[in-house]
Image: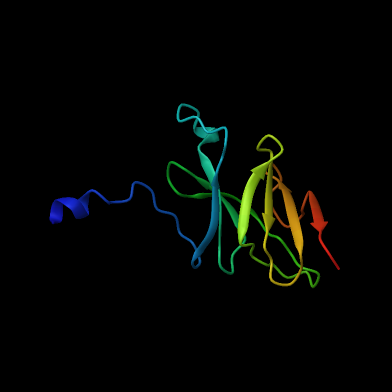
Amino acid sequence: TNTAKSAWNPVLTCETGDTVRSYAWYPHMKSSDPATCCFAGTSRDAPVHLYDAYNGSIRATYCPTNALDEMESPTTICFADNSQKIVAGGFRTDRALHVFDINRPGRQSYATLKSGK
């Protein structure tokens, strides 16, 4: 019915490049504090973005790079270290975790943890 369809209208939309691979809400989010109302997300062939949960705009971008210095999108992300870091993993070309400080967007990882050979 038309009534059932209208119940599913989105409250928030975000522009992504392709299929969403992973997202994580900021664990310390409080609706009364707009600075904390955000979530991290990643999609196919795109870097990690920190989105504003009120309007869907991109607050920050974190670009994991592989051994060839090419941006590579992760398949999974999460917040860590009392929500001050974003951990990204599941890359095609290397078995690594990229750790980003949420206060320092860009290409520079806080740490890169490699697994295996």
Question: Measured from the top left, where is residue 1 in percent x and y?
Answer: 13, 56
Side (left or right) of 24 relative to 110 = left
Side (left or right) of 56 relative to 80 = left
Question: Measured from the top left, where is residue 10 in percent x and y?
Answer: 33, 50
Q: Nearer the viewer, residue 88 or 106?
A: 88
* Colour scheme employed for the rendering of this structure: rainbow
Question: Measured from the top left, where is residue 4 in percent x and y?
Answer: 18, 52
Side (left or right) of 42 relative to 4 = right
> Residue at 62% across / 61% down in the picture?
47
> Residue at 67% across / 55% down in the picture?
88
Q: Nearer the viewer, residue 110 or 74?
A: 74
> Residue at 34% across / 46% down in the picture?
11
Residue 31, image quadrant: top left
Count of numbered tags: 0
**Residue at the limit of the structure toward the top, as seen here:** 32
Question: Measured from the top left, where is residue 12 in percent x and y?
Answer: 38, 48
> Residue at 72% across / 38% down in the picture?
81
